[in-house]
Image: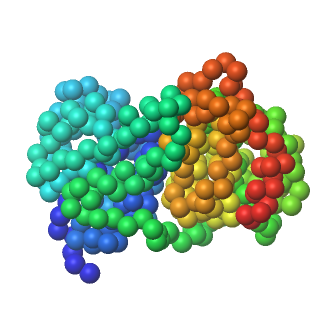
Amino acid sequence: MPKPSKNILVIRLSAMGDVAMTVPVLRALTLKHPELRITVLTRVFFKPFFRDLENVDVFSADLKGQHKGVFGLYKLARELNKKPFYMAADLHNVLRSKILKKFIGCKRFISIDKGRKEKKLLTSGKVFKQLKTTHQRYADVFEELGYKVDLSNPSFPKRVVLSSKLQKLIGDNPIETIGIAPFAAHDGKMYPLNLMKDVVENLSKDYRIILFGGGKNESEILNQFENNFENTFNLAGKVSLDEEMDVISNLDVMLSMDSGNAHIAAMLGVKVITIWGVTHPFAGFAPFNQPENNGLVANRTTFPLIPTSVYGNKYPDTYTEVAGSTAPKMVIDKVKSII
């Protein structure tokens, strides 16, 4: 295998799900083009996402500290320019990356086409069709740089052997394991917790349930689930992102909202079931390499304005619990059919 000789800078600073979606694309890219070395510019928290990738390094941006503002970005660019880079792939295409483009010296600098016009037509109700996936939009950037990426036959890392700490946290009952991540960045994307409680209660009778979340409030809610149901274990606030990924790699299926956990599981090759509220897979954010029917979407006859927005942050008052229109039995049956 040739030694990597061409260094490409890849920029994707946030959000969690969007950064996770770069992973299967970079895996396919580096397997097909081993002559490339990739430097991913992202937030330090996301560094574990790239731990299994050959010829991929992470450069951490401190956007709230030393790299804050235009002067901070200039300082960041000076640090990056010490490499130097052969080309740059901007998978973010926001003001920060546009400013960096002015400061970073390299042969070519290509930015992603996010399809903003098509997405606006989709959320306005003028069109309703599957748009290009975010994964393919990422791949298109590399193709424009001269490196074609084939996402049709992906490979994934092996399941991680769990540490004694993690084994203790999730128990040693040798039954199928379901991950459940019931939270999302916006309420319009969340399955009502009272319904999710029914799902957990039912599934915990026959399967091990691992709960994922973050922050004090989510941890407290998930602790209640853990205390009330058998075979149910809450990892929120107890493990690092690295350790969380270790556990996710051992799941038989992940049940998630349209959120970052779905994309983390998908990038690790885990089967993923998603519950959608006011957003819709047609916007291109479905988890990688999952069958279309693994996405449980709301009935558009009842809720014709779906998707009301790309990110789930805008919706009418009458659409506050759209995700709840998917009955718990439907969710339970879908999980059982896959596991």
In this picture, residue 241 sits left or right of residue 58: right
Identify the image quadrant of residue 148.
bottom left
Q: Position of residue 177 (x, y in %)?
A: 74, 61
> In this view, which residue lies farthest toward the top?
317
Regarding residue 260, the answer to whether it shows in the image is no
> In this view, which residue lies farthest toward the bottom?
1
Q: Position of residue 277 (x, y in %)?
A: 65, 36
Name which residue lies at 79% across and 67% down. Answer: 175
Name which residue lies at 76% across and 41% down. Answer: 326
Q: Position of residue 170 (x, y in %)?
A: 73, 57
Identify the image quadrant of residue 90.
top left
Q: Position of residue 217 (x, y in %)?
A: 68, 30
Q: Above or below — where is 189 with respect to 86?
A: above
Quarter of the figure with the C terminus: bottom right
Q: Above or below — where is 82 with respect to 305?
A: below
Name which residue lies at 57% across and 34% down. Answer: 307
Regarding residue 127, the answer to whether it shows in the image is yes
Between 135 and 115, the residue placed more toward the observer is 115
Between 268 and 63, the residue placed more toward the observer is 268
Quarter of the figure with the N terminus: bottom left
Between 172 and 17, the residue placed more toward the observer is 17
